[in-house]
Amino acid sequence: MGPLTGRIRVPGDKSISHRSIMFGALAVGETRVTGLLEGEDVMATAAAMRAMGASIERSGDEWRICGVGVGGLLQPQAALDMGNSGTSTRLLMGLVATHAITATFTGDASLSKRPMGRVIDPLSLMGASFEASPGGTLPLMVRGATTAVPIEYRLPVASAQVKSAVLLAGLNTPGITRVIEPIATRDHSERMLRGFGAELEIEEVDGERIIFIRGEADLQPQVIEVPGDPSSAAFFIVAALVTEGSDLVIENVGLNPTRAGLVEVLRQMGGRIEEFDRREIGGEPVADLRVTYSRLTGIDVDPAIAPSMIDEFPVLFVAAALADGTTTTSGLEELRVKESDRLDVMASALRAAGADLDEEEDGLVIRGTGGVPLRGTANARVKTHLDHRIAMSMAIAGLASRDGVLIDDTAPIRTSFPNFEALLAEATS
Ligand code: S3P
């Protein structure tokens, strides 16, 4: 395949798309959303909100959501099928937890292995009760509190999903719910809840963020434009950096500082990534990015940057496998509980493609080829374990390999980036 050139746009941000549907479904009146990601994960959120009373329809390029109001969610008549989506599950568990309804959550084989105890703990303190499968996994049933209690909760893991679950539970809880975040994570919930008119304050004390939300909130319908997803742009950024002759513009990429870690790390490695036309869309910073082929050099990645690029490590590992010298990553235990164990699965997949690396408990140490293409896997199929980001990362590794990389299953890509293959074909044609 040729170098990546021209101008492309990636689909809407997944985190912001989920939230625009959930918050629209809780506002009274009609919220209109453009640029919504129409991947399976977001559609799982939409189906669940419909099952709890909201009306959500596509009309031309726009999605129209008629909400039921905070406190107005209806009891779903059947189990809510969350598919592959951890974000849908954990945030909706938060919503159900403080409505006087009962809901059962189910998911695919990947989601059914993921830990839900991290949201069950705070939501139980607020008065919800749970019947979960062994190990605190799906399928699980949530019985929402009839009278919810506001809590102050210090996050034991740096997780935007846990933070958001508590904030969403706080929406229908009398009084003020507080979340203390020792390490900042993506703040889309906070930005968007304020946009919808919730009373939400943020204080910084001794380097920690304290978020206060007042329930029982009244949310006002909004008109939302969803920016392009930096986590989807990541695959094209790395592909352009490692493919000789590439000069690619990716338009309209969300660059919220709590999401922009990959761009910073790739620049530290020598990647040429320029920003143009910085602007704000839907309360989020956005820019066009121009990415040109660059010789990358291995670095020690500062673990403090991990939360702002938590979904981008699989594709960073691909960049590292092609860089000059060694890249060391650490502090990445959370990657073991994503859609797959992303440390173990990427270590095996990259090794199968000829990369030289060690897997540590909390990161990978990767000795790059210095720009020489990887061998590739020829006819051996890389196992992606129902993980969209492993499939896309290994597709990019395939571009930068001699024999290509064969992937066992590309279907999971539809969860977050339905036109990934078409866009890659367009950029490389
Ligand atoms: C997300 C938060 C992150 C991220 C996920 C989306 C969100 O998960 O990995 O893809 O939209 O809040 P954690 O909260 O588990 O870190």
Image (spheres, rainbow, N blue to C red):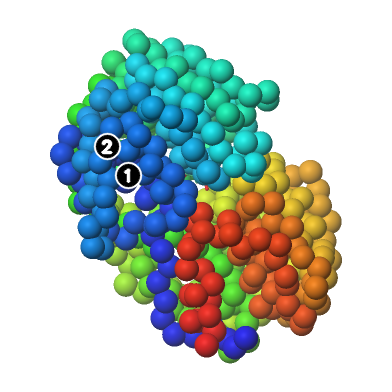
Relative depth, front residue between 301 and 99: 99
Relative depth, front residue between 304 and 44: 44
Q: Position of residue 229 (x, y in %)?
A: 43, 60
Task: Measure how far apart labels 1 and 2 are at the Cα level.
Answer: 9 Å
Q: Earlier in the sequence, mark 1 or mark 2?
A: 1
Residue 147 lies in quadrant: top left
Numbered disc 2: secondary structure: loop
Camera sees residue 339 = yes
- Residue picked out by circle 2: 54
* Residue appearing at x 58%, y 59% in the figure: 411
Amino acid identity at mark 1: Ile
Is residue 236 shown left or right of residue 37? Answer: right
Numbered disc 1: secondary structure: helix
Question: Which label is found at residue 150?
Answer: none
- Residue picked out by circle 1: 21
Amino acid identity at mark 2: Ala
